[in-house]
Image: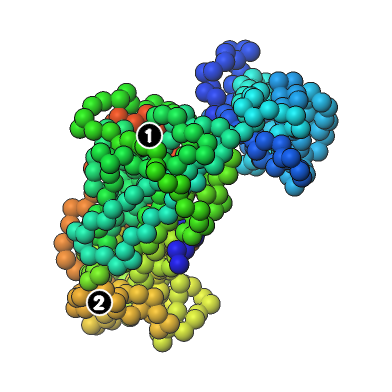
Amino acid sequence: MVSIFMDKRISLMAAAGLATLSLGAAAPALAAEPAIPLSGPSAQVLQPYPESGTSKERSLRYDLDRTGTGAGTGTGFPGEFTVTVDLTKVAGLASVRLDPAKPRPNCTTSATAIVCKQQGLSAVPGGNGLDLLVSAAQGGKNGTSGEITVKGAVAGASVTPVTTKVTVGGPDLHVGEVRPKAEVTAGEQQDLPLAFANRGTLPARSVALELDATAGLEPVETYDNCTRQDRGGAGATTVCLVEGEFLPGESYQLSPDSPLHLRTTERAYRDSLRYGVVPDPAPAQGAPAAKTATGKRLMLVKAPAAVPVTDSHLVPGAARTGNTDLNPDDNQRAFDVTAKAATADFEAVTASPAGKEGDTVTAELGFRNKGPAVIDYVRSGQSAARTDIVMPAGVRVTDVPRGCRAVNADGSDRREQLGAPRYFCDGGTLADVSAPYTHTFGLKIEKAVAGAKGSVTVGEPAAAGTRLHAIDPVAGNNTAAFTVDVKAGASASPSASASTSPSPSASVSASVSASASPSVSAAGGASGNLASTGSSVGPIALGALGAVAVGGALYAGARRRSGRHA
């Protein structure tokens, strides 16, 4: 059964339609005053008022973006802050009220406006936000639209307003299920027959198909209306924008002239693909102009039969396409595959710092995945690898990095974290190929001990420390010696570290923390299969389908960092 654990990837669907006004959108009242933008959804569709029962409410969230305003920590604008929700243009079309689950004091409500006041601006994230519930009003006709405008006022700054277009009715895209083989081999290709139905009340004027694949899976075909953003070991997100009119009551599938296939790469182990569809996606900010690269475009045609009704493998609640889709819970699905005969060679990374008695030195200790498979446990949340570090005699640990915990010599739990003889370090949920994953220890050289030698061992987490990874074919490099060179009377080396073998010139590295996966990623861009600069939409974010997430400069080039206590 497909896990619906939502990895922490950034996804655009959470932001599809989110309109944060630019600081330059309106001239400030005074040249010296900062302009603070309000943010909120640019559009919202509503279920038409039902023949029986009550109308379904949707959530609207507005907030004040104080980034870069120089307002300090909450005292920069001590005067009264007023938020006004103008409802005059949705009268008779929509009912709007404050969300009782997220109350705001000092608010007044009338048929035409909601006004809320507070003293000063809050420095707490979300502390200046306003939560509303909106639903179609009785008598509101399918297809009619209006606007909700939210304005703000505070002494010492200008506040740029935000407007949300509210429409009664809308598309409801239900994505069909794809059933690939559960076990695959490297190099194997499978058909990806994407299809969807519009079960809503209005047509979609365009759709974005989004594929979010882990590192061992990749689309085969390349089309001019598709873009791809690479996340290194975390995989890649591909978005294809298809213009057209996708009518209520109709089903659509890929044109025979533009199929999609999914290839299994040598980096495959336990991989997943999440796929979905977004109606009327908002254009990506700063999207490149369309270019003809291959002369081919991914196209959709009406399906001869309706998309089967099934909830199997849906990923409900993760997609936040509610701005443009009446029911965002059926917009995306996921499936898992396992690569047969996959292997990943884990190698211990050790160090040999030097100094004299009394010196404090540092040592970077950890592991490297030499591949070819990438170990991706982001969805399950389990640790991809653990290092078991035994300290050499004569040194005392003075700084324990984050992600590591002290144990006694026999591996049993220990309360005191400093000065332990042994440490277990969990390396996060992702182990990319070649990039070293290390933790930096601070060590005080207390005395010289002849022949003192510690060790670094890498493997799967186990009760006693580690065990050999089931897919690791090379056991000989899982353990390496760890020594400290004590030099009598010599100057202390501030820091030195080395590995059992020369490090490859990897372009990405990883930092390791106790609570999150290593921040490994490569600079994204329109490269690789299905990638082009032709689409005017960035990854649409099928709810973290790109932790996703996606749409903006998502992934910066990773740097090699060691987790340390502050």
Q: Is residue 160 above or below residue 309?
A: above
Q: Does residue 444 appear to the left or right of 281 in the view shown? A: left
**Label 2–label 1 contact, CB within 8 A:** no
- Between residue 375 and residue 443, name the one nearer to us: 375
Q: Is residue 381 visible?
A: no
Residue that badge 1 annotates: 241
- Tell me what residue is drawn at x 30 percent, y 25 percent: 290
Tell me the quarter of the picture where residue 348 sits. Answer: bottom left
Q: Hey, what amino acid is under mark 2? A: Thr
Q: Residue at x 36, y 67 (%)?
A: 384
x, y percentage for residue 6?
Answer: 49, 56
Q: Secondary structure at mark 1?
A: strand
Please state, as top left, top right, bottom left or bottom right, where the N terminus lies in the image.
bottom left
Under mark 1, the amino acid is: Leu
Q: Position of residue 393 (x, y in %)?
A: 33, 80
Type of colouring: rainbow
Q: Residue at x 54, y 18 (%)?
A: 25
Q: Nearer the viewer, residue 143 or 321?
A: 143
Q: Where is mark 2, residue-wise? A: 479
Is 494 in front, or is 178? Answer: 178
Task: Name the quadrant containing residue 92.
Answer: top right
Apparent side of residue 481 relative to residue 135 in the rendered image (left or right): left
Please, is residue 368 above or below residue 300 in the view? below
